Image (cartoon, rainbow, N blue to C red):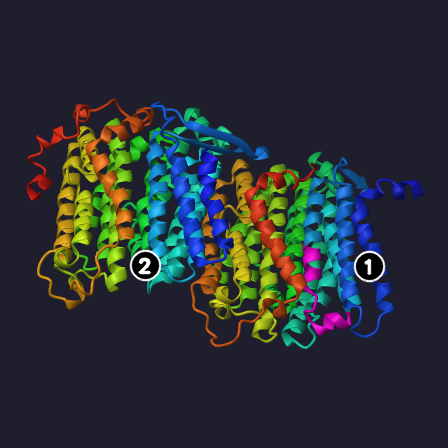
Amino acid sequence: MLSILTFLPLLGAIIVLLAPSDSLKKGLAFGATVVTFVVSLLLLPGWQEIPDMQFVERYAWMPDLNIYYHLGVDGISLWLVLLTTLLMPIAVAFSNQHVKQNIGGYLALMLLMETAVLGVFLALDLVLFYVFWEFSLIPMAFLIGKWGSENRIYAAIKFFLYTLAGSALMLVAILALYFQAGTFNLLELQSAGLPPGIQQLAFLAFALAFAIKVPLFPFHTWLPDAHVEAPTAGSVILAGVLLKLGTYGFLRFALPLFPAAVANYSSLISVLAIVGILYGALVALAQRDLKSLVAYSSVAHMGFVVLGIFALNEQAISGAVLQMVSHGLSTGALFLMVGMLYERRHTRLMKDYGGLWASVPIFSFFFLVVVMSSAGLPGLNGFVGEFTILLGTYASSPIFAVLGAAGVILAAWYLLHAFRQVAQGALTNPANFKENLPDLNWKEIGQLVPIVLLFFAIGLAPNFFLDKINPSVAALEVVQSPAVGDEWLVDSSFQPLHDFDNNPLTTIH
Amino acid sequence: MDTALLFDNAIVLLPELVLAVGVMVLMIVDIGRRGENGAPLLAGLSVAILLLGIGASLLIWGRPPAEYLGGAISDGFALSVRLVILIAGVFGVLLSRNYLPDIERQGGAFYSLQLLAIIGMMLMGTATNLIVLFIALEIFSLALYILCGFYRESPRSIEAAMKYFLLGAFASTFFVYGSALLFGAGGSTHYARIHETLAAGGGNPSLVLPGIALLLVGFGFKVSLVPFHMWTPDVYQGAPTPVTAFMSVGTKAAAFAGFFRLMMTALPSFHDQWAAPLAILAVLTMTVGNLTALRQSSVKRMLAYSGIAHAGNILIALVAGTGAASSAAAFYLFTYAFMNAGAFAVVIALEKKDGGENDVEQSSLAGIAEKFPALAAAMAIFMLSLSGIPPLAGFFGKFLVFKAAVEAGWAWLVVIGVLNSAISAYYYLRIVVAMYFQPLEEEGEEKERLSVLASRSSLFVVTVAAIAVVMIGLQPGLWTGVMRGLGQ
């Protein structure tokens, strides 16, 4: 099951490369991603709300070295897998419309990327994980370097080397763990109880790799370049999925394997996360390029996820997992919409727009929904994740929660500012007039509707998602007992709206 | 001497014997031909002989380790290294087809020298005796000196041969001197006996370290460890590229095999003393190799410095000095044979594009992915594999060596190794960037057909090597068991 899921896209990539015509390649690539999505949906009917790994597969891969091909999925990875398989067909559909040059290679790389990312989310053997982790760099670097905008080569090299160098030490740490415990099996390593000295060093090595991927301040400098230069679908996958590999890594490897080290470093990492939240938001506020704004907003939003993870309680971590999915959807949609705009006008500067509500109402409506979701409007997905994270963080450390909440205000500020500049105001630039700027066509609406539906699904029925996440999170060794305020999600997700007078978003709304 | 003893265990050297007979057959066939006729026949014959050699190695594969006349042994390590060298040899012969008029004219000499070099290299991996080791070293070195100068119209090639010969001869003298001191220390030229004597507290241990130091110069020269690496870029660049492709893999495999066996069977009791200096040498070799490779504009020189850096990686396995480390080194060399020979094969295919210069500039690779997509894809695979990106073969070579080193307690050395890998990614990636991301410079020309530029046999090598690099990477488990270490 999981193997089929992981390698379907790879099979698709090979078929796409062999297909004779461009239109056939497009159809096949889209078909492959849709089939993969359908297969991933099959995980849900048989899902049990237990902490253990499910759908486990284990075969000998390098038997003399004790390395196994070992896959499994639990509450932490389930929604990330589904996020990946959902965003892929959307990104492929967008690319099918807009990518002109060498579409076959482009689509094959996208599909390769899907295999690599799914492999990272599903691997339970450290070597297998590392292989998928490193391999995921190649397709992305090619997508940026070949199909990106002006500075693409610089951005591709920076992205590749930065992340490669970051994970080099992780390999040494993996070998050191094997030396200590005699296994590369994640589940066995978790119960092995590593000596604290090794934990400290290994944690730092793992954390560096993950922090660069997230990216955590001050390791974020590759991100704006990569995002801005990448082709739209590349940005969607980069922001939507690849960044989650870092936070997922923290949850799947750093927390369970190195509890002693996590206790030491959690406040340091939380501080970095908060700096990232505030810094990312402030820099986003200063951007004139819409795509850079979204890129820096990712730094801020991913800071929330890290903050939640290192609050080390069930509520915050569950919130962080949900926020990963939310951020993937919101930011994916934002990049998609920026791309739609760019394909029409070939500019991303916000000052070139204004008053689009009058000329392209459908676009503007969707843009408003996406902006609101990203800003954390209650009733939509972003709110649930951020609110749960802040609530959980408050239980661990009120000051961090307060500072994080300031980030929410700033997020609302720069996002609404962007929306105002693009969609509201007077329609003065003739290039933006109705005659010159076509509104979204049904294909583009089709790409956005599934995402928007999920905004509402997560926003209105978060428990459907959290119930599957919670058991696995609760089973983490570092997690403290459930914090106060856990009850608010039990009945209905609309209830918290009542005690929300202090949330700036309600006033803006 | 008792004749029965002469034939006892002679099967140990079956692959060498097959090749030796083959060399004679080649020379006889060469007498019968006129001018440039028959060059394909000679090449075909050489490949056939090498395949027979591989067959002979496989024939004695399953046997328990046995020693011949106190001079050569066939254990898993020797067989693994032999296989690596024979594969590099087959690649070398195939790549030399249609490469140079000189090779066509003097095919007999070229191919028999290549086979002789292979015999010497294989002996190096089996030698258990200082004298056999030295003879093996000289057999392949002398053959290679001549092969490097085979491009007679090119001053660079002559310079390469001259430089390699002079420095090589110099290194050999150090080697002999070191052997003499070891003989003085252990009272024997036989590894096992040296070890016995020294381990029992006999002999003259004070001579051991000077002996190792001098031998190290000889080995260091052959595998191009810093600071004995100066010849490498000039020779790699000047020599005909098929020879470079062959020797870059073959010499490294042979010299490391000899080095490993000497240090680990004759001098294991001195491991504490020689490991630390070798570790420093490994750090120097990796770092200098990688940092210098960053600055190269010629692809061949870049690959030469990358080869130096890889020698540093393999040296880490020797520093670790365990059986697992030696099998890791054998696996490393096995993967290196495909990715490095493959990379040179691509260089050969592209040399003709630029008008027959014996080298390729990185700038002339710009945009060739549009022109020759398959060739560029293969080169990208080799480059990514050399830089150790999973899931390609090169990653698992490094992985095994690093794993063995961590298990032997050399974690700090592995940290430097992985950081060096990250540095090396930059110059390998630069090739990929040039091929894929930069625009094609020449315009308007008709699409050249690659098969016109490069010989079919060299394209065959590219294909086989690329497939091997990917397949070994996807299923490394099948090969880690095949590549075995000392005493296995």
Given the image, what chain letter belongs to the residue carrying mark 2? A
**Which amino acid type is shown beneath numbered disc 2?**
Glu
> Of discs 2 and 1, which sits in the foreground?
2
The x and y percentages for residue B431 are: 48, 62
- Would residue A302 appear left or right of A137 to someone viewing this image? left
**Which numbered disc covers residue B409?**
none
Q: Which residues are magenta?
A: B88-106
Residue found 70% across the figure and 40% down from its top:
B76
Residue bearing mark 1: B23
Residue bearing mark 2: A229
Residue found 44% across the figure and 46% down from its top:
A134
**Residue B296 visible in the snapshot:** no
- Nearest the camera: B280 or A254? A254
Q: Are marks 2 and 1 on the same chain?
A: no
Quadrant, the C terminus of chain A: top left
**Quarter-of-image position of residue A376:** top left
- Nearest the camera: B242 or A460? A460
The x and y percentages for residue B371 are: 51, 67
In this picture, is A1 found above or below B136?
A: above
**Which amino acid type is shown beneath numbered disc 1?**
Val
The x and y percentages for residue B390 are: 50, 46
The x and y percentages for residue A314 are: 26, 27
- Would residue A487 appear left or right of A317 to someone viewing this image? left
Could you tell me how many numbered marks the image carries?
A: 2
Residue found 30% across the figure and 30% down from its top:
A263
Q: Tag 1's secondary structure?
A: helix
